[in-house]
Image: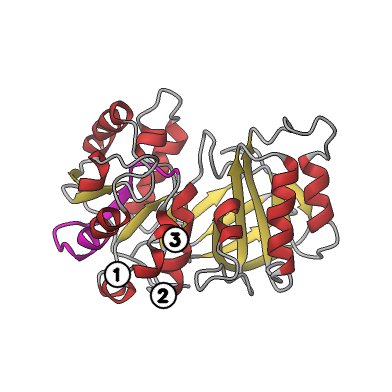
Amino acid sequence: MKRQPKRLKRGDTIGIIAPSSPPNQKSLERSLIFLEDLGLNYKLGESVNLVNGYLAGTDDERLADLHQMFADPNIAGIICACGGYGAARYTDRINFDLIAHHPKIFWGYSDITFLHTAIGRYSDFVTFHGPMLASDVGKDTFQTKSAEMFEQLFEPIVLQYNASFGSIETFHPGQCQGELTGGNLSLLSSGIGTSFEVNTKGKILIMEDVDEEPYRVDGMLNQLRLAAKFDEVAGIIIGDFSNAKPSKRKVSLTLDEVFDHYFGKLSIPIVKNVKIGHCQPHFAVPLGANAFLDADEKTITIQPGVQ
């Protein structure tokens, strides 16, 4: 298990950054009330108000925001405003020593997956895959179950996912334990062949995505297969694949047929349709924490992400 950042306390200040694309400002503003209700103060990074095409400012500006929030001793944790695209453009210039010496809560998902993988690999502490402020919290669709996931930041809670939270199905039976890793499949795939590719050996791999047709999911899973990422993985959690319907190709394999092709012969525990990803409710998880996956009982037990 990776190092755990310190838990939050009521009254702490959260840094809010936009490491990828510009957030919807109205949605972000609405989300700030949620932080206040949690008893948190907040500081907005400069990137949150910048627009550079599909990016929240230049790469230099977004990178500076990331560094400043980690270095600032008055910032207890960092929550990303939204994902989108662009975090990988500057990941090779991140000062991972700086981040390693200032471990703190770092929370987001989607395009933020690239940063989770990189920080976990080079700064060696737990980060959190969970709903973001403008993308989720500030919208009418945000659910109470998703809101409750933020409580894991205030206490070292053992998390339990089962059917009482949302859907979960057995794809392949069995039990395993290991460190959680993964996130958005598109970003995991794009990291292959770089110094930021995901390490799956002995770990439980989470994957989710949104708006990707079955043939696209097929291509990304094949990339991971060719990179031997399924050879020594302990178990797999297939999260939510929202709107994964064929549109370009009217004749298509189903998503389940794609999963069966890549995972059907793996003799490891696998569950699917778990509510992790671009969905509501959204089960937030500490990446780098130890977990126990019981595909027979359809439960996932995760050790605390904070100390």
How far is the residue under mark 3 from the one under mark 2?
Answer: 10 Å
> Which residue in the protein does label 2 denote?
122
Secondary element type, mark 2: helix
Give the magenta range: 67-84
Q: Amino acid at mark 1?
A: Ile
Question: Dot 2, how many residues are within 10 Å of its Cα: few (below 14), some (14-19), or many (20+)?
Answer: some
> Which residue in the protein does label 3 denote?
116
Residue found at x 31% / y 74%: 100
| Sequence-first disc among 1 and 3 | 1
Judging depth in this view, the residue of 62 and 156 nearest the camera is 62
Secondary element type, mark 1: helix
Asked if residue 304 can be seen in this view, the reply is no
Secondary element type, mark 3: helix
x, y percentage for residue 124?
Answer: 41, 73
How far is the residue under mark 1 from the one under mark 2?
Answer: 9 Å
Q: Is 232 on the left or on the right of 110, as rendered?
A: right
Based on the displayed image, in which of its 4 quarters is residue 6 positioned? Answer: bottom left
Asked if residue 277 can be seen in this view, the reply is yes
Judging depth in this view, the residue of 78 and 46 nearest the camera is 46
> Which residue in the protein does label 1 denote?
99
Residue found at x 85% / y 33%: 251
Question: Dot 3, how many residues are within 10 Å of its Cα: few (below 14), some (14-19), or many (20+)?
Answer: many
